Amino acid sequence: MKKWTRWEDWVAVAAGAAAMLSTLFVPAMGASLALMLVLGALLVISGLVNLAAPGLVAMESVQAALGLLLFVSPWIGGYVDTASGAAWMSWICGAVALVVAVLAIRPSMQAHHDAIPH
């Protein structure tokens, strides 16, 4: 598998960037600002690592975990009560990141398997 070509990882990078950038436009509630900035940045980083090294299966799992954390962050960070824009952005970006990470695990496993000399 060629580097920098996997659409799943580009979508994860975009979801992380959207979570981060949305903090500029949606009112902060609870710990939404910190959680969305940190988890969004970590999603961007994990997506870039996956793009640079498409055979790292563990990084796909890390990306899925980050997507899950972003999805549940409104409950963890205390900004779910109002179903604010921050909560919706966390749910949407987290779900998108989680789904594309799950979709990317099998191709990543195949790339890892193909890279091992037989």
Image: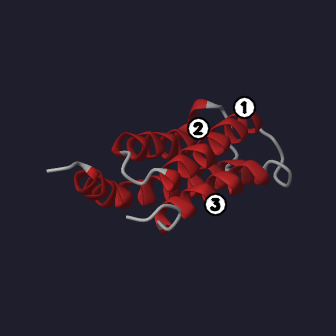
Alpha-carbon neighbours of circle 3 within 10 Å: few (<14), some, or many (≥20)? some
Do residues under tags 1 and 2 come within 8 Å of each other at their CB atoms? Answer: yes
Residue 73 numbered mark, or none: 2
Q: Which mark is residue 14?
A: 3
Q: Position of residue 42 (x, y in %)?
A: 61, 40
Residue under label 1 = 31
Mark 2 touches mark 3? (CB < 8 Å): no
Which one is in front in this view, the residue at disc 2 or the one at disc 3?
3
Question: Disc 1 versus disc 2: distance between alpha carbons?
Answer: 9 Å
Q: Residues within 10 Å of mark 1 (few under 14, many from 20)?
A: some
Q: Is label 2 in a helix, a strand or a loop?
A: helix
Image point (33%, 55%), residue name: 108
State the CA–CA distance, disc 1 to disc 3: 22 Å
Mark toward the start of the polypeptide (2 vs 3) = 3
The CA distance from mark 2 to mark 3 is 18 Å
Q: Which residue is pictured at 38% across the width and 42% down the height? A: 61
Q: Position of residue 52 (x, y in %)?
A: 52, 52
Query: 56 or 44: nearer the eye?
Result: 56
